[in-house]
Amino acid sequence: MMPEYVAEKFDVVVIGGGHAGCEAALAAARRGYETILFSVQLDSIAMMPCNPSIGGSSKGHLVREIDALGGEMGKNIDKTYIQTKMLNTGKGSAVYSLRAQADKNRYKEEMKKTLEETEHLVIRQDEVVKILTEGGKTTGVQTRSGAIYPAKAVIIATGTYLKARCLYGETIIHSGPNGMMSADGLSQCLRELGIRLFRFKTGTPARVDGKTIDFSKMQIQHGDEKIVPFSFENRAEDIWREQVPCYLTYTNEQTHEIIRQNLHRSPLFSGVIEGTGPRYCPSIEDKVVRFADKQRHQIFVEPEGESTHEMYIQGMSSSLPEDVQIALYHTVPGLEHCRFTRTAYAIEYDCVDATQLKLSLEFRDVPGLFGAGQFNGSSGYEEAAAQGLIAGINAVQYIRGEEPLILDRSEAYIGVLIDDLVTKGSKEPYRMMTSRAEYRLLLRQDNADERLTPKGYAVGLISEERYQRFLQKMEAVAKEKKRIEETIIAPRAEVLDFLQEHHSSPIKTGTRLSDLLKRPELTYEDLALIDPNRPTLPAEVQEQAAIQIKYEGYIRQQKQQVEQFQKLEKRRLPEDMDYDDVKGLRLEAIQKLKERRPASIGHASRIAGVSPADISVLLIYLEQRKGAK
């Protein structure tokens, strides 16, 4: 046992330097609170141990929301992308999602540099092994060396490092991702604090030497010509650069047969792996078993960066033995002679049952202790960063004795993510998807600034200069929207010709430009030909005005749904409420409500085991309680 000594006092301690830890530490330090971030290895700060990309379907929404609140991930990928693409453009704007391939090394280098240059923030290589408490409240941490760091709030963002082990075939390595040191000391302390832990599993594919790939057998995948920044602070022309291509190929029956013949050698199927894996990001062997009728699976070949030949083989994550991995990779067109630089592996790690958290991400039974990222049972860089930002904000709110920032399901994908984890829990790594958001027409990636910038400004993470630019943009959108609604288009010959060319019905009388924009076959860009008085405006102003008009009816309908939802969210439930005293509640509901301590009637209604009848009982009880006062 190392001798104990008090090292240095901080306001906030962040445990872990992954995507959650970085956002948490920056959020606390930027608000002027003395913060220290511990990482078992400083070289792993903001590391991308899996796919070399940021964003994607629904995840792009999270990144833009992080940026709108004053987080760093969007700015960092804008600095370090090597390819960018807007996904789902064949569908409605509600599900458009921005995705960028990252230069992995540059991404983590730029993020580490940002941390190092941030005032009030210290980064330290050490392993935290104990959470210190007094009277049930968090008072600091202790490291493996015996150093004690008193603190007012602690954020656990251990990612996939907590009691981690990597597996492929019969090989088991007790380490974190990419051979980094695991963090083995904290789990026992958490259990002693009464915190329930799960064992989860995720995986990653092999990396191969790009010089040994035959790209001529693959389909080239270029980025978009039009650059869309992740950060609302950036302009496309300021971050433009030459893009690097990716490639598409496919598995085949030969690939699948090798997998089927060797399933008994996979720790996933032999029972060696204890953790539960992600349903929506399965290994290649899992895909072959679960989708036995599919003759092939997509494989994307993605550069890991501009200064390396390593390529990431998206879609081929595996825990099969190395010799089997090499054999099955060699069956894929273009990879017949590929040489591995890193073997694929599965990784198991400890994480927390997130139903023990409040919506603020603070542990209900350990005041001042917060959880964020994959420690909370989620999967993905973006989900982690979003939680880290909220945990960092709320750690400061806790210290200040102020109300936490809680985003509800109608305000942000971040709200959906946290509400799902805390209210419903997850028995497998949670992945954000657009289908999880009931109000996704309102929660578009293009309007994240409109929804969340005022909140970021209120907590001090958005500068005055940026906030004033945001207000000017909103004013310009409102002005252009009003102009479109008031502009009358006469049925002139050139207008009728235009409508005919676009297969749109002719007009017989003067028609509002806004009514033409609502036609599905006409876009804002198309209408420029018959809109001679259109002012020159920034692209983002044009986009917002056009979307708000084009989808006006749907948006109005969804806002009405949100109003109903918020009525239940605003019916607050006292934290010290005695559910045993509420007559008419079923025993299961009493048990779940006592365990979860929901913040509102709406929150309670989403807890499994609480029925609509139980909600009616609670509403009646609140009315009677109100009347009694």
Image (spheres, rainbow, N blue to C red):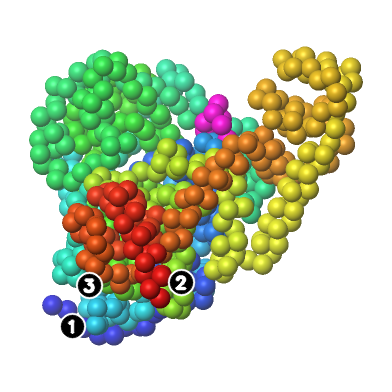
Residue denoted by label 1: 3
Q: Which is nearer the N-term, disc 3 or disc 1? A: 1
Residue denoted by label 2: 403
For this orientation, the residue located farthest to the bottom is 6
Spatial CA distance of label 3 from label 1 is: 14 Å
Q: Quadrant of residue 269?
A: top left
The amino acid pointed to by label 1 is Pro
The amino acid pointed to by label 3 is Lys
Residue denoted by label 3: 130
Q: Quadrant of residue 156?
A: bottom left
Q: Which is nearer the N-term, disc 2 or disc 1? A: 1
Disc 3 residue crowd, few under 14, some 14–19, many 20+, Cα 10 Å:
some
Q: Is residue 525 magenta?
A: no
Tell me the tag on residue 501: none
Q: Is residue 86 magenta?
A: yes
Q: Residue at x 25, y 85 (%)?
A: 5
Please identify, in this view, whether the residue under mark 2 or under mark 1 is nearer the observer.
2
Number of marks present in the image shown: 3
Determine whether 19 is above or below 561 in the image: below
Query: Percent position (x, y) of residue 483?
Result: 81, 42
Determine whether 420 is above or below 331 in the image: below
Left or right of 563? Residue 350 is: left
Start-end of magenta stretch? 85-93
The amino acid pointed to by label 2 is Glu
Residue 618 visible from this viewpoint: yes
Determine whether 580 is above or below 566 in the image: below
